[in-house]
Image (cartoon, rainbow, N blue to C red):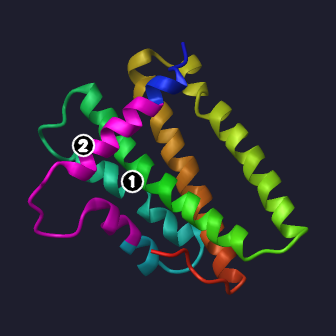
């Protein structure tokens, strides 16, 4: 059984709301800042930058209070939100600086990538028990969005285009 898009969207919004608006004392950068810093400091290229995938979720999962399945899923969703934002920013930055036919090809490729990713990351729900799929599905999305964000970033950099604003 596949989770509904509405449930997933509500979970993502809830996680993001809690994560962004609950005050937490931190002695260091936030996990999303750590991840962004990792990407910037890593050597150029996808292989070197993939070491950054999982930083947010693993830091959250290392918290001994996050033992329940819903807490583990929330940790993975936090990571997803960071990569999703990075991917959208890199896509927008690349798109804003291209001319046709490259613009049209990028839009078509992104549309096909989104369709593939959705189908691919729903597969764990058909393959595994609900307990295993509950984490395998979200991790699939994290991996897919992270690699896509890093690819878009690398292409933008290879073209000598400016980084996304912010």
Q: Is residue 136 among what the camera can see?
A: no
Q: Is residue 57 among what the camera can see?
A: yes
Front residue (pair 59, 18): 18
Relative horizontal placement of residue 64, taking residue 140 as reference (left or right): left
Range shown magenta: 9-36
Q: In the image as oriented, which residue stretches furthest toward the bottom? A: 160
Q: Which residue is drawn at 8% across and 60% down?
A: 25
- In the rendered image, which quarter is residue 153 located in? bottom right
State the quadrant of the C terminus: bottom left
> Crowding near pointer 1: few (<14 within 10 Å), some, many (20+)?
many
Magenta stretch contains residue 29: yes
Q: Give the percent coordinates (x, y) of residue 160.
A: 68, 87
Q: Is the magenta stretch mostly helix, strand or loop?
A: helix
| Residue 38 to residue 88: above or below | below
Q: In the image as oriented, which residue stretches furthest toward the top? A: 1
Magenta stretch contains residue 112: no
Q: What element carries label 1?
A: loop
Q: Residue at x 32, y 54 (%)?
A: 56
Q: Residue at x 60, y 74 (%)?
A: 45
Mark 2 lies on residue: 18
State the quadrant of the N terminus: top right
| Residue 129 disc label | none
| Residue 54 disc label | 1
Q: Give the percent coordinates (x, y) of residue 74.
A: 31, 37
């Amino acid at each position: 059984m596949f989770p509904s898009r509405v449930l997933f969207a509500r979970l993502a919004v809830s996680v993001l709301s809690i994560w962004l608006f609950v005050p937490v004392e931190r002695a260091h950068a936030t996990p999303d800042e750590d991840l962004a810093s990792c990407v910037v400091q890593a050597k150029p290229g996808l292989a070197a930058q993939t070491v950054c995938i999982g930083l947010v979720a693993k830091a959250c999962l290392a918290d001994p209070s996050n033992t329940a399945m819903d807490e583990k899923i929330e940790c993975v969703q936090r990571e997803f939100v960071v990569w999703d934002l990075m991917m959208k920013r890199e896509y927008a930055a690349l798109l804003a600086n291209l001319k046709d036919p490259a613009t049209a090809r990028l839009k078509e490729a992104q549309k096909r990538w989104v369709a593939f990713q959705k189908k691919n990351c729903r597969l764990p729900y058909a393959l595994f028990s609900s307990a295993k799929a509950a984490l395998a599905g979200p991790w699939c999305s994290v991996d897919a969005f992270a690699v896509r964000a890093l690819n878009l970033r690398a292409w933008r950099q290879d073209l000598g285009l400016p980084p996304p604003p912010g």
